[in-house]
Each structure stands twice: as structure tokens, then as C-alpha cells.
Image (tube, grey):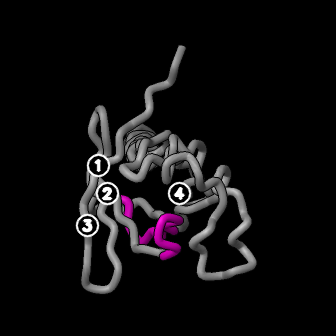
Amino acid sequence: MIKIKLTIMIIIFSTIYTFAQKADEIIGKYHLPNELDVEIYKDGDTFSGKIIALNNYKDGKVTTDVNNPDKSKRDDPLIGMVIIHDLEYDKDENQWTNGKMYGPEKGMIFNLKITEIGTKDIEVVGSKYFFWHTMKWGKIKLKL
């Protein structure tokens, strides 16, 4: 009887550990098509992302949030700005969903979902109202 209980406990803990590992696969640094680099990190039970490099974003001229609809935030620096919030791992769909992403190039907030993680990139779906756009974000390799 003890062996059965122990086996069941091991199965339960290994399943929980496997889901946690899978969810954390999103953690890393990514190069976005708009020339921003973003780092995605665990933030409690969800995932967030902040800008870590501009890479000549808007021809290297813009370093502050000039398109923010809140005029008081237009002088805020883009580097370090958290632009991804509330991204959750959905183990049934094997996707990260329900996220929000602020796009500084338009000063708008979009819905965000990450549908696939590859070896070199991730597939991201951004949506606003009835419009959606799928794109690839390249993984940034660590330099050793």
C-alpha cells in the first residue's frame, strides 16, 4: 500500500514539474521585427517582458515613448519599459495566452498570444479588435 501511495505521489509531482518546465520555455531574449529586443521573464504566476535594446529603432532617433497616448509618459525611456503583461501558460493548448503588449511604435495595447516555440524563433499572434497578425520573434543566443 505504501508503494502505491509513493508511486502516485511521484507521478503527481513529476507531472506538476513537467508543466512548470514547459511553461518556463518562453523565458528568454527575443529580437522583434520592429528592431526592439525584449526579455521575457516570470512574474509571479504569469510572464512579462521588458525592452532591453533599441537596435536603431526608428532610425536610432527615438529613445523615449513619444507615441504614448498619455502625454505625461512621452518622456519615459523605452529601455527597461515593461511592454508585455499577464501572459499565462495554457497547458491544454500548449500556448501562452491572455497577454497584453504595448506597442510603442503606435502607442497602442494589443492582445498577445505565443503559439509555438522553435529552436531559433517563437511564433507570436497580436490582435486588436477583429484584426490579428502572426509574426516570428527571433531568439537571441547568449554570447559565451
**Closest to the observer, 48 or 17:** 48
Residues under numbered marks 2 and 1 in contact, where contact means CB atoms less than 8 Å apart: yes
Label 2: which residue? 124
Label located before the other in sequence (1 or 4): 4
Q: Nearer the viewer, mark 2 or mark 3?
A: 3
Label located before the other in sequence (3 or 4): 4
Residues under numbered marks 4 and 2 in contact, where contact means CB atoms less than 8 Å apart: no
Q: Which residues are magenta?
A: 95-108
Q: Residues within 10 Å of mark 4 (few under 14, many from 20)?
A: many
Label located before the other in sequence (2 or 3): 2
Residue 98 drawn in magenta: yes
Q: Give the alpha-carbon distance from disc 1 to disc 3, as whole Å.
A: 10 Å
Q: Look at label 1 and name its amino acid.
A: Lys
Residues under numbered marks 3 and 4 in contact, where contact means CB atoms less than 8 Å apart: no
Could you tell me residue 99's position as x and y percent?
45, 68
Could you tell me residue 44's position as x and y percent?
62, 59
Label 3: which residue? 133
Local secondary structure at mark 2? strand
Label 1: which residue? 136
| Rendered view: 59 above or below 99 | above
Residues under numbered marks 2 and 3 in contact, where contact means CB atoms less than 8 Å apart: no
Label located before the other in sequence (2 or 1): 2
